[in-house]
Image: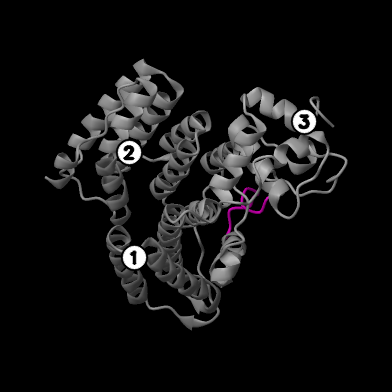
Amino acid sequence: MGKDSRLAISLEILQWTPERLAREINRRYGDGTVSLKAPYGWIKGAYPRGRVPGFVATILSESLGRVVEIRHIWPQRFPEAESTGNDNDLRLSPPWSEEHVDRILRPLVEQDDEEQLQAPFLVPGAGLVLLAVDWLTAESRPASARTEGAELDPEMIDMLFGRIARLRRLGDAQNSALVLNWVVHELRWARHLTRNASFDAPTARRLYGAIAELAQLAGWLAADHGKRAQGQQYLLAGLRASGLAGDPNLGAYILSCLSYHLMRGGNGLDALRLIRLADAGADASAPTVLRSLMASHEARAHAQLGDEAACRRLSAKAAALFDASGAETDPPWAVGPKRHLAAGAGRAQLAQRRNKAPYVYPSQKRVSA
């Protein structure tokens, strides 16, 4: 190895120093995860220990905009290393079924707090785009009836949705870690119902709609609490559950959350691809506030990429759509997009200063009106 190693070439493409890579690892996975000089040794032939190879692969994948696996970086040392995001990844592979959602949720809702620290690797942007294409083109197959177990009273689903609405409000006002634990508790109970109760097809779709909303909320809170990979895992489970609920608009909202997280990680290109796929997948009944949110995300992605004209156009579109949304009756989960749009005013100013593009969210004043 050396200056011609794959790691060295990747850093050269990114125009990163080895210290920059070390700082990025420590920023994402905790101060002191690696020393600032460690990547110099990796370039010369030393091999990182523990989970660090996966951290490096994930960061390079997101930053380069393509899948980089451990075996690509250290082919001689890690010939059998697992992929950071390919077709064998449970989160990305078909089918879109009840069993698949259950398999993704199980490790999330059954692990304790200590185990949650061992979060899965982030799926890189390229992998998320492929999943979004699958979501957009997959044949719709809503959840079906279940005949085994005690009968599930639809009123219990009503109660569950009521609790979700309260948890959304708490998520804005309380410690995100505390609310996240509560959301995961509700998600665990909802999963229990899918495995142990009997219900008709309409109730099944509502149940998976509740699971999708809970997973979206858990994903947002986890990322807000600094658990980005765990948050992404919840969002991916929620995306699949939204398909079983037969709700493409909720799925589009969850994709917009994934797009936003990519932007926060600096991957504006894949964020742009993701939000465009979300917009294409939303149906004609999509709330106008969701269309506004997607336009604002697209504007921000263009701002990050330095496209001033596109940013201006989509910022104006987002504001116009938001102004037109006031008279609508929105689904309960649309509270999230409205609050996100309101909070965007400060981020808009930062985007303008950093990227010199006029990225403008609807104002807090219009949200409160």
The x and y percentages for residue 60 are 65, 36
**Image: magenta residue range:** 89-97
For residue 36, side relative to residue 256 (left or right): right
SS label for mark 2: helix
- Which badge, 3 or 1, is on the more N-terminal residue? 3
Q: How is the image coloured?
A: one colour
Residue at image x 83%, y 38%? 45
| Residue under label 2 | 293
Mark 2 touches mark 3? (CB < 8 Å) = no
Q: At label 1, which amino acid type do we have?
A: Ile
The x and y percentages for residue 207 are 43, 66
| Residue under label 3 | 6
Along the line of sight, the residue nearer the viewer: 318 or 136: 318
The x and y percentages for residue 20 are 60, 34
Q: Is the residue 261 above or below the residue 113 in the image?
A: above
Q: At label 3, which amino acid type do we have?
A: Arg
Q: Residues within 10 Å of mark 3 (few under 14, many from 20)?
A: some
Q: At label 2, which amino acid type do we have?
A: Leu
Is residue 256 found inside the magenta-colored segment of the image? no
SS label for mark 1: helix
Number of labels in the image equals: 3
For residue 369, side relative to residue 207 (left or right): left
